[in-house]
Image (spheres, rainbow, N blue to C red):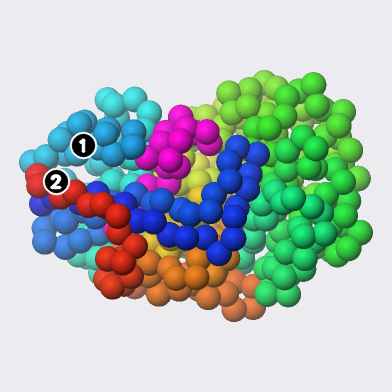
């Protein structure tokens, strides 16, 4: 295979409501898309960077720059036997996993479309549907949060994840449990908002039967998470700390995590995500698929990944209307608390041209 060229495209997608975490509030998702044309066939990848480096060191302007100056030139004129070569070719450039993931996904999508194979089949999916969890952001008051949770449960979501931060944690979880009972699958996500000094406070969450507490400490504090895991009954799940199969193996060995949130963009792509899945299965560690408020393109790939056998917990694979009134693709609609795994070639979905054009704010074509 040879890459004919790569298009970078920015789209601006308004959210149905503000989404607040411990590090930012989003009212609009500005998404960087990568379209790779391989032997005349196009494939799509979604870069999950945010506008500023608050969630991770990567940010969207930086992703555009590194793609233009380093990553795309490194692939120019290269004969590829498959998308699996992308990672090795780009390995000399340190970091920038989200940018690399977007390119690899676009090339992989094109490759699979050429060969008539689905991403789900390529990754090793064993399910035709995946259960839907929903992530509920930090809000101004608890009654408003309870109304939101009530609505999501009524829609059929099978798991609720609450974003937390100091001052918005124990009382919030208690209120949800008192309102909806102990049978609701419930977990919390701190996005690195705490330190080990907060261990005694976080231990108060043990009373609520949570599935897990996600990334309570800074991403580099693996030993701190290992220490915290000894002090809490609630399982520790790592997210930001897991950037590769290597870091996942180290975290498991040190006892820093007993559950892993796999975000393909954060780990460098879906092929590395599969390696982490395989490692976790071998170690008896459950995994689930995290989300980054993706459009239908990224959502399709995440659903395919979440259909692998080791994904035993519901992930952040919500329906399109959780975040968007209008998606870039045909919308993902939840039925009986689950989304169908796309079965068509590649991602199994493609942007709707009129919607894509309407939401596009910038494009650049880079011939190769």
> In the image, what residue occupies the spot 27% across and 71% down?
353
Left of 78 or right of it: where is 227? right
Near-viewer residue (300 or 360): 360
Looking at the image, residue 197 lies above or below residue 149: above
> In the image, what residue occupies the spot 88% across and 55% down?
175
Near-viewer residue (365 or 158): 365
Tag 1, which secondary structure?
Answer: helix
Position of residue 160 measured from the top left corner of the image (x, y, whole percent) = 71, 58
Looking at the image, residue 136 lies above or below residue 156: above
Q: Residues within 10 Å of mark 2 (few under 14, many from 20)?
A: some
Q: Is residue 106 visible?
A: no
Q: Main secondary structure of the magenta part?
A: loop
Left of 339 or right of it: where is 119? left
> In the image, what residue occupies the spot 77% across and 60% down?
144
Q: Which residue is mark 2?
A: 366
Tell me whether the residue at label 1 lies in contact with that at label 2, contact meaning CB atoms closer than 8 angstroms. yes
Q: Earlier in the sequence, mark 1 or mark 2?
A: 1
Tag 2, which secondary structure?
Answer: strand
> In the image, what residue occupies the spot 59% across and 28% down?
219
Q: Residues within 10 Å of mark 1 (few under 14, many from 20)?
A: some
Left of 34 or right of it: where is 223? right
Q: Which residue is mark 1?
A: 68
Near-viewer residue (39 or 293): 293
From the image, which quarter does the C terminus lie in? top left
Position of residue 349 measured from the top left corner of the image (x, y, whole percent) = 35, 69
**Residue 356 is covered by the magenta coloring:** no
Q: Which residues are magenta?
A: 44-60
**Residue 58 is covered by the magenta coloring:** yes
Looking at the image, residue 184 lies above or below residue 137: below
Residue 230 found in image quarter: top right
């Amino acid at each position: 295979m040879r890459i004919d060229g790569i298009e970078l495209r920015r789209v601006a997608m308004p959210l149905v409501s503000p989404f607040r975490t411990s590090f930012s509030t989003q009212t609009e998702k500005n998404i960087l898309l990568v379209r790779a044309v391989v032997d005349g066939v196009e494939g799509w990848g979604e870069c999950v960077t945010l506008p500023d480096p608050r969630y991770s060191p990567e940010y969207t302007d930086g992703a555009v720059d590194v793609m233009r100056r380093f990553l795309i030139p490194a692939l120019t004129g290269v004969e590829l036997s498959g998308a699996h070569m992308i990672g090795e070719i780009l390995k000399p450039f340190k970091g920038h996993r989200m940018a690399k993931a977007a390119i690899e996904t676009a090339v992989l999508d094109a490759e699979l479309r050429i060969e008539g194979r689905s991403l789900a089949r390529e990754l090793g999916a064993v399910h035709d549907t995946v259960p839907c969890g929903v992530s509920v952001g930090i809000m101004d008051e608890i009654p408003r949060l309870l109304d939101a949770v009530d609505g999501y449960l009524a829609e059929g979501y099978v798991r609720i994840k609450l974003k937390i931060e100091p001052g918005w944690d124990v009382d919030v979880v208690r209120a949800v449990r008192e309102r909806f009972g102990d049978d609701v699958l419930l977990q919390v996500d701190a996005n690195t908002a705490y330190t080990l000094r907060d261990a005694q406070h976080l231990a108060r969450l043990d009373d609520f039967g949570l599935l897990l507490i996600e990334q309570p400490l800074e991403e580099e504090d693996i030993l701190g998470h290992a220490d915290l895991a000894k002090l809490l009954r609630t399982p520790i799940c790592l997210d930001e700390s897991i950037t590769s199969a290597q870091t996942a193996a180290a975290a498991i060995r040190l006892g820093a995590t007993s559950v892993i949130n796999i975000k393909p963009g954060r780990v460098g792509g879906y092929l590395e995500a599969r390696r982490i899945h395989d490692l976790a299965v071998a170690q008896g560690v459950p995994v689930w698929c995290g989300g980054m408020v993706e459009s239908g393109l990224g959502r399709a790939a995440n659903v395919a990944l979440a259909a692998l056998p080791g994904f035993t917990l519901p992930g952040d694979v919500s329906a399109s209307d959780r975040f968007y009134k209008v998606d870039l693709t045909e919308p993902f609609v939840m039925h009986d608390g689950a989304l169908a795994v796309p079965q068509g070639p590649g991602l199994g979905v493609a942007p709707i041209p009129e919607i894509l054009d309407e939401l596009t704010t910038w494009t650049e074509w880079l011939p190769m």
